[in-house]
Image (cartoon, rainbow, N blue to C red):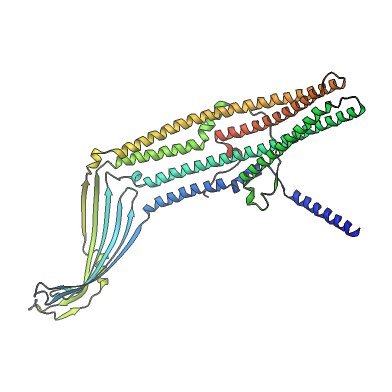
Amino acid sequence: MLKYKNALCFVFIFFLFAGLHAQEKKISLTLEECITKSMRNNLNVAVEVLNPELADISISLAREKFLPTLTFDYYLQDREEPSFSLIEVAGSVQADYTDYIGRIRQLIPTGADFSISLYSYRRESNLRYQTYNPRYTSILSFDFTQPLLKNFGFKMSRREIIVAKNSMEISENQFKGILMDTVYEVESAYWSLVFSLEDLNAKKQSLEWARNFLAKNKREVEVGTLAPIEILSAESEVATREADILQAEAEVKNREDQLKTMINLASEEGGMDAEVMPVDKPDFTKKEVSLEEALEMALQNRPDLYGIRADINNKKINLTYAKNQLLPELNLIASYWSPGISGTELLYDPNDPLGDPIGSLPGGAMDSFKDAFNFKFRNWSVRLTLNVPLNTMFSRAQQAQARTELDQSRLRFKNQEQQVILEVKNAVRAVETNYKRFQAYMAARKLAEKALEAEEKKLKVGLTTHYTVLQYQRDLANTISGELRAVIDYNLSLAQLDKVMGVSLKNKNIKFSIFE
């Protein structure tokens, strides 16, 4: 007996803790909390947030063309060739070559190219009659090339940057659209769950009415005041309403799973197994909506319109670029250079200048560098070059393509503008209609309550049937569900109106900032 009691105690404690554990897995969430979680956890948002980041990287890449480039070259060669002149050398000509070159190059926003280079080399050979052997030569040069027609100007040189910035704006506005869609989808999932729960409660209340009515009928049959056949309709109605509850419970789970997916509750510990309990109740306060104000706000705030405007700007710069590429290449080229030379100077007998060297004066590479940097020998040149490609005289396909793409973007903007106007009109109409629907269902629910109450009184005096009372109960349950659906639809139509006006993020106090 003691073991039996211990077993019962264990079972009781087990189910107690199981019940407490189940209670711990209920999560009460407001609509604001769900929206916050979706902004933080939603996988679609997480994917789309990378697009503005990629666009920002594209701007950085486009700007890199104006970063200076530094190049170094090193060249080493050892040559041996047969001699063609006994005066120069007998046998073979041997020479060692060592070349160095360093250059820094910078693009200028006017389209010009500016470079500074230092070229230095060392030559040593067995040839006769040389002044310096080994010989060191250094040349410091400045080169400037400015296009005057094709590729001239700030707009042409910065075209990639301008396009990248516009593309960044397009990407940001697309992301804003994704956020607004996500906010609306979360609101829709949240209020749908609220409706499913309230509808389930209404159906449970309807089942309780039917069960009470069935119990009452059974008591009347027992005392002989009611025929047994009258129980059948009540039992049928109870079974039907129990089936309705099963369907409503399944709908609650479906809506709950949909909301969990939207806010990615699975990313939180134990979130997928938790039961979500909505805290907020739908608001049925009438909101005055002016169609003119709604249209003005939509045309000012819709991110899709901003995105198309940015795309039009891209197409304009592409058309300007295409026109510019049809011009001839007229370039102004200016150069300034300073050479320097040094090395081991060979000394010859003035009376026998064609004889062998009689001595040498040592010298190093630094002397040639000093001459170059001190501008000991100054040289400059200026020239104009003109290149007229014949293909641009006969083919203007690139310009025609750019113009057509610009026309497409402008038509796309007009089409989207008309679509926005249509969406706003429909949203304003839906707000007004759903509020009237709510008022109508509320009046219908009150009338259904009075009708059921009157029918029950008539049943007591034998002026109606039990079946009719059951029908009135079902009518009341349907009007309650209709009223719930209407108030939910009214709240969703307000959310849809905010979305089509492009103000849902602002109204929810969601600040859009990809990069700080």
The one nearer the camera, 233 or 132, is 233
* Image height of 507 relative to 377, above or below: above
Q: Residue 15: horizontal and vertical position, in percent?
A: 80, 52
Of residue 500 and residue 273, the one placed in the foreground of this image is: 273
Q: Residue at x 84, y 18 (%)?
A: 463
**Numbered label tally:** 0
Residue 446, picture quadrant: top right
Q: The N terminus lies in which quarter of the figure? A: bottom right
Task: Quadrant for residue 485, please give it.
Answer: top right
Q: Position of residue 344 (x, y in %)?
A: 20, 76
User: Is residue 361 at least partly visible in the picture?
Assistant: yes
Is residue 289 visible to the viewer in this orientation of the structure?
no
State the residue lying farthest toward the top: 463
Extreme residue toward the bottom, this view: 358
Q: Residue 90 appears at what percent x and percent y?
A: 11, 77
- Is residue 378 positioned above or below 507 on the image? below
Q: Position of residue 36 (x, y in %)?
A: 62, 45
Left or right of 230 in this view: 129: left
Q: Name the residue furthest left.
A: 351
* Residue 7 in the figure: left or right of residue 486: right
Residue 321, compared with residue 455, is above or below; it is: below
Q: What residue do we see at 33% from left, 52% from top?
A: 107
Residue 386 drawn above or below residue 476: below
Q: Nearer the viewer, residue 350 or 283?
A: 283
| 219 relative to 275 in the view: left or right | right
Where residue 391 sits, quadrant-wise, is top left
Q: Residue at x 25, y 41 (%)?
A: 392
| Residue drawn at (64%, 29%) of the image | 287
User: Along the horizontal axis of the image, is 264 left or right of 380?
Assistant: right
